[in-house]
Image: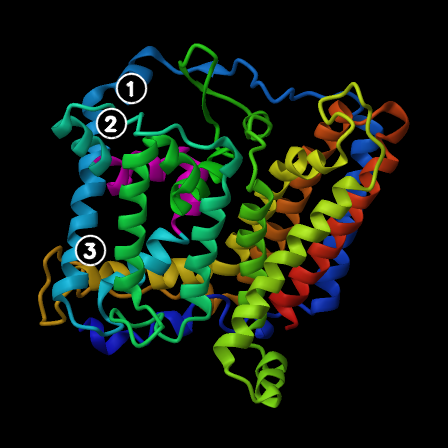
Amino acid sequence: MVADLVGPVVPLHGLGGAKDLPIPAPLAIAGGTAALVVSFCVLILAWRNPRYDGKGELGRPLPREVARTIDSPWFEGGLRLLGLIFGGYIVWAMVAGPDLVTNPVFGTFYVILWVGIVPSSVLFGRFFRAVSPVRTLNLLFAKATGSDPAKGLYAYPERLGYWPAAAGLFAFVWQELVNPRSAYLGASGLHPGVMTWVVGYFLIMLIGSALFGDAWLSRADPFEVYSDLLAKLSPWARDQRGALVLRSPLANLATLTPRPGLVATVAVLFGSTAFDSYKDSVRWVRFVDKLNVDVQVVNTLALLAACSIIAITFALATMSTGVDPSSEAGSHRRTLPLLFAHSVVPIIVGYMTAHYLSYFVEQGQITVLQLSDPMANGSNLFGTADWSVDYWLSFHPTTLACIKVLAVVAGHIVGVIAAHDRALALLPKKHQVTGQLGLLVIMVAYTGTGLYLLFGA
């Protein structure tokens, strides 16, 4: 049965044996860095005018029947119902199921939700928003009270921007990577289990949506904000009339609104992945052991430091140029990190793909098996409990290694393209090349460090 096949979910997550992948770290780092520098040089010569103004190009309209189906109330309602039913099923497994790693709650929380949100959002757009149980519950409560779900008691403070989502994302990665109760449902002392985290998430989101309406979910729900960011790389978009169209992902990416907290949000997503790559390395474990300090305190500070380093270095790199007072950036150099933050999104997708690919494919299959037997009593509710797990990726390390390197390098190249196009639109002519050197240097550093962590840490 499933219990005999599955080890602990959380300790197995991430890269596992990345250091054993059959590509030397120096070769991967040199190749990735060279590809990034060459791409930048080609852009300087061949891409001399901005192509994406951030307002979104028109795009190609979908066939009328397809657009009508996607926009129909029954399609939207079906997705909402699907999300609500699946969410209810997981809550049942969380409340009534055993506190064992074979409980599908852990795989759903750490694999299907956290990692699965990447391909689902890139392929299908704002996927989590469409199936979010919290958004559906807010709609049902609004209908029951005769209110408008889009409007709460107060207007959402624009100065908050994405800061609540950044805090929520940090709380999630702390739960996953630092908390010793990450593989338990129940809490112990000051360490919350998964159940405590989920209950807190629902309470905060539901209270916030009652106060500020759907705007709270769009800015504060960590999973919805994460999904919406990644959806900017999908081909799905809406034109100025609200019609569904297919559009270049780079054009979509340029429409990301630079709200307060955006840099912090992408820094948490990026920095936490880097920390996850390093925290189980022999070097880090020995370092923590020598400190003779509580490992959770050290790891919490290290996680915070990793996210802060990304935010600070990115801000410094984007501000290391001159600005035109009459441009969108104005005379305030501090606005540049927000205006360039969209270029980090493809880098995040690349790192998430490289870091979690085999974990998602293999642990995702195991979670599907577990979903048929949530009570660990031998049930086979969906007929999947007896399925076998395909470890093809683990058995082909060369292919896996190539995919990982390509994902990291491709993410950075797309990020460089997005940053270059934005620089052409924002920076004065005399700074359009030199103004990007800071970003190029920091992206080369990110690439080299990421590939080192991937293969050599």
Res 366 seen here: no
Amino acid marked by disc 2: Glu
Res 82 seen here: yes
| Label 2 with label 1: CB-CB less than 8 Å | yes
Magenta range: 116-136
* Residue to which mark 1 is pinned: 71
Q: What is the number of the mark on residue 363?
A: none
| Label 2 with label 3: CB-CB less than 8 Å | no
Cα–Cα span, label 2 and label 3: 21 Å
* Residue in the picture at 36% in, 58% down: 111
Instruction: Decide which of tag 2 and tag 3 comes sooner along the chain.
Output: 2
Amino acid marked by disc 3: Ile
Q: Nearer the viewer, residue 43 or 396?
A: 43
* Residue to which mark 2 is pinned: 76
* Residue in the picture at 51% in, 53% down: 353
* Picture quadrant of residue 71: top left
Cα–Cα span, label 3 and label 1: 28 Å
Left or right of 375? Residue 21 is right
Instruction: Decide which of tag 3 and tag 1 comes sooner along the chain.
Output: 1
Q: Estimate the x, y position of residue 354 in percent, counting from the top left.
A: 54, 57
- Predominant SS of the magenta segment: helix
Residue 117 on the magenta span = yes
Q: Estimate the x, y position of residue 319 in percent, counting from the top left.
A: 77, 40
Left or right of 14? Residue 406 is right
Amino acid marked by disc 1: Asp
